Image: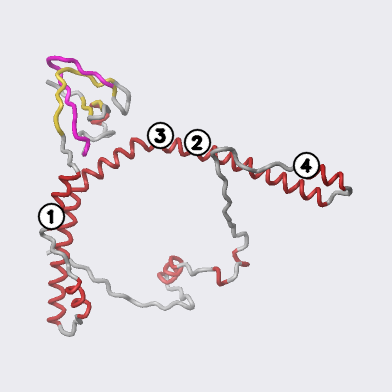
Amino acid sequence: MRWLGWAWKRGHAACRACIDGGTVPEFFDGSGYRVTVYEAATPNFSTKCSWCGSVVEGENCSVTKGAEMSNSEAIVQAKEALVHLPPVTEEWLAGLREFVINTDEDEQFVATLLRSVKDKHDFGDEKRKTITKPLNDALRATNALFKPALESLKEVEALLKGKISDYVARKQAANVAALHAASQAATPEQAVRAIDMTAPVAPPQGVSVRYVWRLEVVDPDAVPREFCSPDDDKIKAALSVGIHVPGVRTFQEPIVSSRKT
């Protein structure tokens, strides 16, 4: 018997070529089911590959349950892992905040405690990942399936909004020009004719238009100093090559890390 392809429970399928080529994983974490297709017996199985469109077909289609984790199962596993991570009480934290290292023995005590805390954190984080990884993989795969369609619709939405915005801006500009012409008219009749050229700027039904202030710095040197902020990245780059920057104090800060025991 030769395996030809698989399909997960919502009817999407992948052919062997797409799986071998790395387009899709051989097993879809979180999907729940996969359909394994062989060449023997009946009934026949046939469906299209959701990636390349080729036909996935065979006989003796058998459905097997995949490694799917329900929300309740995830919560049970999380609670079992948390038994090994006793909560840190506020009283214990308060004592730790007040503790001061005055001797080498104090420092060694704190270092031992640090390694223990780090080990517990790493243990808890690994347990968390074993629970969340299948869920996150399923989330990423679902987002990837929807992404092309949603991005296309978002682009169309932006284009349509842009056309309405452009039309509203042109009507506003025409109204401003008409009012200016009215203010410069030589006779009342000319002023009335100019005002008659104005048009309502109300958006169509089901659409709203709001206005926000935008800015563009056209002359950086003219912007007052109180509206400027020092650029940390540029200052660090200058200091790294030995350039003195006025108004900046440099100092070294020790960074402590803990290795796994």
- In the structure shown, which secondary structural element does the residue marked by tag 4 occupy? loop
- Name the disc covering residue 81, or none: 1
Q: Position of residue 164 (x, y in %)?
A: 59, 40
Q: Nearer the viewer, residue 205 or 61?
A: 205
Does 70 appear above or below 101? Answer: above
* Neighbourhood count class around disc 1 (C-alpha, 10 Å): few under 14, some 14–19, many 20 upward: some
The amino acid type of the residue labelled 3 equals Ala
The CA span between labels 1 and 4 is 76 Å
Q: Is-magenta flag for residue 137?
A: no
Q: Which is nearer the N-term, disc 4 or disc 2?
A: 2
Pointers 2 and 1 in contact (C-beta within 8 Å): no
Q: Which residue is mark 2?
A: 156
- In the structure shown, which secondary structural element does the residue marked by tag 2 occupy? helix
The amino acid type of the residue labelled 1 equals Ala
Residue 218's image quarter? Answer: bottom right
Q: Which residue is mark 3?
A: 149
